[in-house]
Amino acid sequence: MDSTNTRATLTISGMSCGHCVSAVKQALGELNGVTIEQVAIGSATVRYDPAVVQPSAIADAVSDAGYTASIN
């Protein structure tokens, strides 16, 4: 993996089931420069290329899917 990729852990509220996990995976998967490592109820771990996408855009994608995300 490119060494410019940075790991981010998101805390996500509003998730309660497998459908929520799928919705967040889909939202994150649509972002250029983001590789999903793990999505579970309440959290996600991704790697991203800061030259392509900013952390705020990652959180916004989760918000657009109907959840509240903060990046740790």
Image (tube, rainbow, N blue to C red):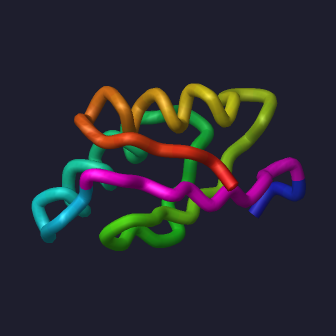
Seen in the picture, residue 72 relative to 30 is either above or below; the reply is: below
- Residue 55 spot, x, y in % from top left: 66, 36
The quadrant the N terminus occupies is bottom right
Q: Determine the residue located farthest toward the right in the rendered image.
A: 3
- Quick check: 9 left or right of 11? right
Give the x, y percent position of residue 53. Answer: 66, 29
> Picture quarter containing residue 39?
bottom left
Examine the residues drawn in magenta and state their main secondary structure.
Answer: strand
Q: Is residue 67 above or below residue 14?
A: above
Question: Is 53 or 44 nearer to us in this picture?
Answer: 44
Q: Which residues are magenta?
A: 4-14
Q: 3 above or below 53? A: below
User: Residue drawn at (31%, 70%), measured in percent from left and top?
Assistant: 41
- Residue 4 at x, y = what percent? 87, 48
Where residue 14 sits in the image (x, y, percent)? Answer: 26, 52
Total marks shown come to 0
In the rendered image, residue 54 lying in the magenta stretch gets the answer no
* Residue pictured at 69% horizontal, 55% vertical: 72
Residue drawn at point x = 14 percent, y = 69 percent: 18
Q: Quadrant of residue 61?
A: top left
The answer to whether residue 60 is left or right of residue 48 is left
Give 66 or 31, whichever is nearer the viewer: 66
